[in-house]
Amino acid sequence: MYSVAGTQNYVADGLVPVSSVEAGKYIYQGTAKSYTQITVTGKLAQHSALPQNSQVIELIQRYILEQQPRRRTLADRRP
């Protein structure tokens, strides 16, 4: 599980307090196989801007999309 906190001032992103994001580690403790929290800062770190934030997009590509197991194709199934 990845938890991404956006912050403009290390207290809040203008909407969600960082402490609320950090509380996720207690909520998912014992449930998630692994838990990683990442804090993103900068002008586009507000809650509603995170899906377009270049840092968040890079994190998704690096840690989620590139880590997915490769799907098997018909060619892979041939002996």
Image: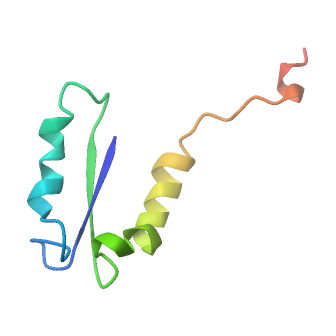
Corner quadrant of residue 14: bottom left
Q: Is residue 64 left or right of residue 26?
A: right
Rendered view: 36 above or below 9: above
Colour scheme of the picture: rainbow
In the orientation shown, which residue stands out farthest toward the top? 79
Corner quadrant of residue 56: bottom left
Q: Position of residue 15 (x, y in %)?
A: 19, 72
Quadrant where the N terminus sits is top left
The residue that appears at 46% across and 73% down in the rendered structure is 52
Rendered view: 27 above or below 57: above
In the orientation shown, which residue stands out farthest toward the bottom? 43
Quadrant where the C terminus sits is top right
The number of numbered discs placed on residues in the rendered structure image is 0
Q: Position of residue 50 (x, y in %)?
A: 37, 69
Q: Position of residue 69 (x, y in %)?
A: 61, 34
Rendered view: 1 above or below 18: above
The residue that appears at 42% across and 74% down in the rendered structure is 53
Q: Position of residue 60 (x, y in %)?
A: 47, 56
The residue that appears at 90% across and 18% down in the rendered structure is 78
The residue that appears at 82% across and 30% down in the rendered structure is 73
Q: Is residue 32 left or right of residue 66?
A: left
The one nearer the camera, 45 or 69, is: 45
